[in-house]
Image (cartoon, rainbow, N blue to C red):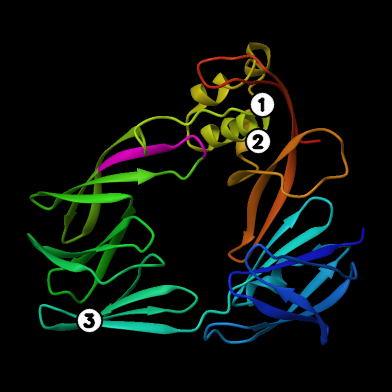
Amino acid sequence: MQPTIVCGAAVPGMVYINGRFAGEVGPDRPLFLPVSPSGAVYLEYRPLAGTGPCLARRLVLSGGMPLPESFETAVGLSGVFWPGGVLEVEFAAIAPESRRFMIDGVPGEIRRDEGTALLLGDMAAEVPDGALPPRLLALEGAAALLGEVAGGGQYLLALSADLTEATGLIVALAIEPIGSGQFDAVVALGDSVGHGRLEQWLVDGAGPHLLSSQSAWSEGFPRWPDTAEATAVASVEAMLAGLPGEAEGYLSPALAAEKPLAAVAGACELCVPMKYAVPDARPCVGLLKAENPRLARVRPLYYRAEPIAGPQGAWQITGLSLE
């Protein structure tokens, strides 16, 4: 199998492969590079804008597939291996940055590199990417930092009363203090239909405690799928969300009786539309599973569908197969 590396980057830059100039890459401008199915591949990225550093990384392929361990130390690089021998890699040459602030006379700082950390005095903790400087909330026997996330959402970092130890983190679309150390949170699951949860938390000296959780629509209403492909994706997403009844609602009665989605959900962490053609004429979606924090692998889930309208959309899945 002749593998292809597809390079992408949020910042325009030049790509070199095995020491030779290969082309320019940028947003909505991927670079396709055929490579040897076995051995080391040396990738270099030189940004043409911003202050991000250059990257040079060594990946190893065997039998047309990337070795996961070659990605484990490839800081600034992430990959997705698709069926048909397509290895998608994304360069993220992030320039370290820092933002300092004061909270009640205590110096604070948000540091961004490969991850994002919040420091307050001698305390340090991970916070979401895009975290903005928070405000301090004094609680009974505890404290918390409540802040916004650039691009949407909020975070709550629970602290010990003396601000020296982080005891837990809550990330949600919205977080609202309701008194007595309790908080309401609206959490989006990030799926295509728009599932979410309404959660209530208590923060005390031991950290955050989930008091209650109930299903809800993150936007107040469902976005039911309107294509066969979207229906196949939604069925797997519902199973991953722990909603087997809804998942089976996308299937024909005969297929639902076979319970095919239980095994499918165990084979992936996300279900996505297939991005590149596979060597099979049957329609399919992708089951994505992480190999490590920097590399994920996609396998096809083949499906059959019929345009039969129902309460969860305009299509019904009549067949599912991993082979």
Q: Main secondary structure of the magenta part?
A: strand
Estimate the spatial distance between the alpha carbons at disc 1 and disc 2, rounded to whole Å.
Answer: 7 Å
Neighbours of disc 3 within 10 Å: few (<14), some (14-19), many (20+): few
Q: Earlier in the sequence, mark 1 or mark 3?
A: 3
Name the residue rendered at 63%, 86% in the picture: 54
Estimate the spatial distance between the alpha carbons at disc 2 and disc 3, rounded to whole Å.
Answer: 47 Å
| Residue linked to disc 2 | 264
Residue 268's disc number: none
Q: Looking at the picture, which amino acid does disc 3 mark?
A: Phe
Residue 194 sits inside the magenta stretch? yes
Estimate the spatial distance between the alpha carbons at disc 1 and disc 3, rounded to whole Å.
Answer: 53 Å
Horizontal arrangement in the rendering, residue 86 relative to residue 180 (left or right): right
Neighbours of disc 2 within 10 Å: few (<14), some (14-19), many (20+): some
From the image, which quarter does the C terminus lie in? top right
Question: Helix, strand, or loop for circle 3?
Answer: strand
Q: Looking at the picture, which amino acid does disc 2 mark?
A: Val
Horizontal arrangement in the rendering, residue 212 relative to residue 23 (left or right): left
On screen, residue 215 above or below 276: above
Residue 260's disc number: 1
| Residue linked to disc 3 | 101
Q: Quadrant of residue 220?
A: top left
Horizontal arrangement in the rendering, residue 171 relative to residue 161 (left or right): right
Q: Which residues are magenta?
A: 192-199
Name the residue rendered at 52%, 79% in the picture: 94
| Label 1 close to label 2 by CB (< 8 Å) | yes
Q: Earlier in the sequence, mark 2 or mark 3?
A: 3
From the image, which quarter does the N terminus lie in? bottom right
Horizontal arrangement in the rendering, residue 142 relative to residue 88 (left or right): left
Q: Looking at the picture, which amino acid does disc 1 mark?
A: Pro
Depth check, mark 1 against mark 3: the one in front is: 3
Q: Position of residue 131 (x, y in %)?
A: 34, 67
Q: Position of residue 48 (x, y in %)?
A: 62, 83
